[in-house]
Image (cartoon, grey):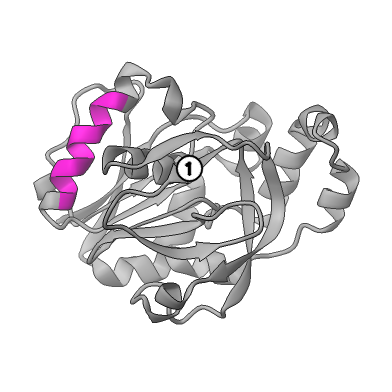
Amino acid sequence: MAVVLIVKTGDAFPEVVDQHGDFETLFEKQLSSALPAPITLQTWDAQRQPSAPASDALAGIVITGSHSMVSHAEPWSEALKPWLQAALASDIPMLGVCYGHQLMAAAFGGVSDYHPGGRESGTRSVRLTQAGQQDPLFSQLPESFAAHLTHSQSVMQAPQGSTILAHNSHDAHQALRYGPRQWSVQFHPEFTAPVMRAYIERQRAALRDQGEDPDTLLGEVSDAPEASSLLWRFLAFV
C-alpha cells in the first residue's frame, strides 16, 4: 500500500484542536476527499517520535505548520533536514506548508528567520510569478488568488537553484519549487475560514502591537478554494 506521510511538526492552539482538529486532521480532511484508492495517509509526529520512517518507501510527504521557529534550530527539527535532503535526492514528492516551507528551504540551503515586517495573518492575496504560471502544480490557479496566512518567520533567502512560484506584498517567497515534484508554500492550504478566524482571535494582542486591526482582518477572512486545491492537485504527483 502506497503511503503519503503527513509530517506533524507541531500542535495547533487548543481551541482550534477542539473545534476543528489538529494540523494533521486539517490536512486529512482536505486530502482524503481526493485520495486515490491505492494510497493511504499516515501521520508521523516528528517532535515526539524521533525515529523517522524510511523516506524512499513513501509515495509522498506533506509537512505541516508549527508554532516552533525554524531559526531556533531545535534538535528534532534539525534532524529532519538530512531526511528531507535524502527525500529530495530520491525524488519523493513533497509539499511543505508554513513551518514545512521554511524548514525545506533551510534544509536545501536557504535561510529562514523572523520577517522584519512582522507577522502576516489573515486571508491575503498571493500572486503567481511567471514561473508559477508555468509550473505543473500551480499553473491551473489564477494569477492572483486568496490564501490563509499566519506566520512571523519567512524564507528570507531562497536556496540556490530553487524557483520562486508565488509572492505578495509581504513575502517574496510565498511558494517555491526545489525539484521536479518538490514544492513548499508559506500559506495554509489546509485552513478553512473558521480556522483562520480562530487564529486571528488568538493573535489579537500581537496584531494590535504591530499596528494592525484584528477586527478588520476578521472581516476580510474569506474562503480560499484555489489555495486549498493545491492539496488535491499535489496528489496527482505521488
Would residue 237 appear left or right of 192 to someone viewing this image?
left
Instruction: Based on the picture, tell me whether residue 86 belongs to the magenta stretch.
Output: yes
* The C terminus lies in quadrant: bottom left
Residue 220 in sight from this viewpoint: yes
Residue 214: x percent and y percent? 85, 42
Q: Residue at x 49, y 72 (%)?
A: 129
Q: Main secondary structure of the magenta part?
A: helix
Residue 71 drawn above or below residue 123 = above
Locate residue 21: give its quadrant. Answer: top right
Residue 45: x percent and y percent? 34, 30
The residue under label 1 is 156
Instruction: Based on the picture, tell me whether residue 220 belongs to the magenta stretch.
Output: no
* The N terminus lies in quadrant: bottom left
Residue at the extreme top of the image, as rendered: 75
Would residue 143 appear left or right of 53 to someone viewing this image?
right
Residue nearer the viewer, 181 or 32: 181
Number of numbered markers: 1
Please provide the residue range marked out in magenta: 78-88
Identity, as a three-letter code, of the amino acid under mark 1: Met
